[in-house]
Structure formats: C-alpha cells, structure tokens
Image (cartoon, helix red, strand yellow):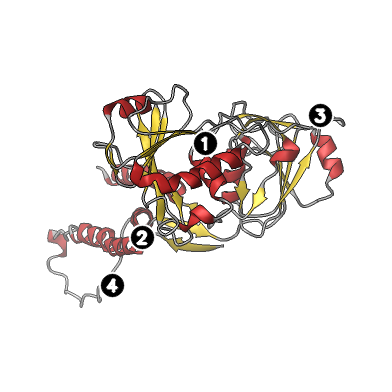
Amino acid sequence: MSLAFLLPAGLAALAALLLPLLIHLARRSEQRPTAFAALRWLRQKPKPRHRIRFDEWPLLLVRLLLVALLALLLARPVLTGGESDAPYVAVAPGVDVQAARAQLDAADARWHWLAPGFPRIDEVPANGAISPTSLLRELDAGLPADVALTVFVPDVLDNADGERVRLSRRVDWRVLGAAQQRASTPTPAAPLNMSVRYDQTRASSLRYLRAAHAAWQADKPSAPLDVAEPTQPLPRSKGPLVWLVPGPVPAQVQEWVRQGGTVLLDSEAAWPDLPERAAMWRDDTGAVLVDGTAAGRGRVLQLRRALVPQAMPQLLEPSFPTRLRALFAPAPAEPKRVPSRAHAPIEGGPSFPVAPHDLQPWLVGLIALMFLLERVLATAMRRAVAP
C-alpha cells in the first residue's frame, strides 16, 4: 500500500505554513515593556540576546496542522495497492449458503452476496430487480486481476441479459438448486421475409441476395424472394426491404420505414435529414460496410459500397447470409429468466485497473475536527489573558 497524489501541484500550498508562524511572531512583538519610576535609578544591565520564542504553542501547532491538511486536500491523496488477493466468492440471493460452503473448501475466501453493494454473507442483501450480469461486470472490474472468483447461482437467473456476460477472468460458475432441471429447447429462428426493389443497373446484385435468402430457408420449405422494380407496391409485411435504387428515396418508402419497417439502401441512395449514423458492419480492416440509424419507429441501413464482389468481397464468403441476417435482427430482447447453466460467463472481456482508495472524505472529517479544536483553544487562551 502506497500514498499517491492525483494533483501533486496542490502540495505547493504547504508554503502557507509560514502564515501561522508569522502571525504568532507578530502578536508577540505587540508586548511592550512598561517603565516603573522605582526602577529608573537602577543601573541598566546588558540585555540578554533575544531568542525566537513562540507564545501559545499548542494553538500554533493546531493551526500548522490545519494548514498542512488543507494542502493535502488540494493534492487529492489516494492509497494504491494493498488489495487483498484472497479468493472471492459471490453468492446470488436464493442460494443455500450452507450448501455452498459445504461444496467449496476455501478457508481464506471472502464470501459476499451477489447484490448491490456486495454485502458480506452475514449481512442481509438488498432487494431489487438488478441484472446479475451487470453485478458481475461491476464485481469483475473492482477485483484485482489475480483474484480467483467463484459464483454460486440458483438454477434460473432472473433479469438476465440476452447474451452471456464476458468477463476479464475465468469464473468458477457453480449452480445450486433443484436436482432435476428441464433441458431448455432452443427457440427456432423466426422466418424472415425479405423484399427487394431494384434498378436495372443493380440486377447483378440479385444473385447474392437470392443465395442469402435461400440459406435462410435451408431448414424449411423454400419461400420465393419478393423481387420487383421500384415502381411496384411496397411489401405489406414488416420484413426487411432492400432498396437497390440510386438517387433520392421516395416519400412512400420513407413513410413505410417510419411506420416500423427496416430498409437497406443502395450505396448511392439519398435520404435527407437523417440523424447521425453508427457503423453496423465492418470488414477485417475496420472499414465500414454498412451503417444505420433510427427513423421514426423503423431503421435505415445503408451500404457504403456497391453490392458486387469487386467492391465488397464479403459477398463470396460463407458467412455472408449470417451477417446479412444479423443486420436485420431486431433489438435485443428485454431481460428474462434463463437457465443458469447456459448463462455461465465467458472469458476475454476487458480488464480495468483497480480504483485507488480516495482519502478526501477522511481528510475533510479530520479538517473539520482540527478547525473545531483550533476554535476551542483560541477561545480558551483569549479568556485566560483577559483582565
């Protein structure tokens, strides 16, 4: 454990320690000798050499300490290091703590609830619908990198995120609950009915869209791809629309999107007054292939390259149908109940340095105490010298 300063320049305020010294010296010089008539005829003896002497030295020490504490407060001191490297065990509320202790043999482990504030296991955890994955991210970011983490959870997690949480360390994920648990059946992907409106100059791009659509229908009866010229009516379904037509996007297409539709625009299509877009698909070099933004209740996606292999070689990769379908995927589902065994954290998340311990709250309290002591001493000494 070591002391550090976030703003070392604040230590220059230590020069203010001269002020209490000068004040006490100045007050001492106010004491003037008084001549008595009876002493006038006595022989004047040589005066001894004056030495610097401070009166009211307890008050002076308190004032010096108060100024030093104010300088330290300006420098923002923190304590770094000293974090415990003992194993950390987090127990989700609802798990039998005795059963968890019997399953894990770790005498030096720290046991805490997986709850807001991470209270000790002998305290009562706070209630609240907090996502356990959010708590795991917070816990992972607050622990040193070399601390082993064990998590006990029940069979089913409430308010879980749609994806498995990715942490910076390997987690010993242990599920405690009912002996029998029904195996979860994966939900099949919903059918996706894509429609294409194209200009004749973009006819060469249709083959790649048809191949992707056929790949989506591989495990079910093949449904024909809705392909038509831009003058044909828009699809009635809310499936995605691919608009391979250069130039301004017609008003009816814009209204169709605002009512909840999703459109993938040609690289040369123009939709005015769109808000700032975000990258939705990048290639291996980081270049943006597709960006998008919201428009009303729908979404607008736009290709940044022509849909031909010469400009977009990703069309020839086996993953193109999957990447294209991911563009049209709806927003992640709301938090839900998931089987704990299928929701174990995975390794590879970002790691963060452990935040230092801020000493400012302690200094503020100590400064308030020293200021109160200074007032008490100053008042007592003033009354002592009063006539």
Image quadrant where residue 138 sits? top right
Quick one: label 1 or label 2, which is nearer the N terminus?
2
Kind of residue indicated by mark 3 = Arg
Of the numbered discs 4 and 2, the one sitting upstream in the chain is 2
Residue under pointer 4: 51
Q: Amino acid at mark 1?
A: Ala
> Which residue lies under the disc numbered 2?
7
Disc number placed over residue 272 in the picture, else none? none
Q: Earlier in the sequence, mark 1 or mark 3?
A: 3
Closer to us: mark 1 or mark 2?
Answer: 1
Q: Is residue 234 left or right of residue 179?
A: left
- Front residue of this view, candidates 299 and 137: 299
The residue singled out by tag 3 in the image is: 182
Left or right relative to 31: residue 197: right
Residue displayed at 80% across by 32% down: 183
Residue in front for this viewpoint, 226 or 249: 226
- Looking at the picture, which amino acid does disc 4 mark? Arg
| In front: label 2 or label 3 | 3
Crowdedness near tag 2: few (<14), some (14–19) or many (≥20) residues, C-alpha within 10 Å? few
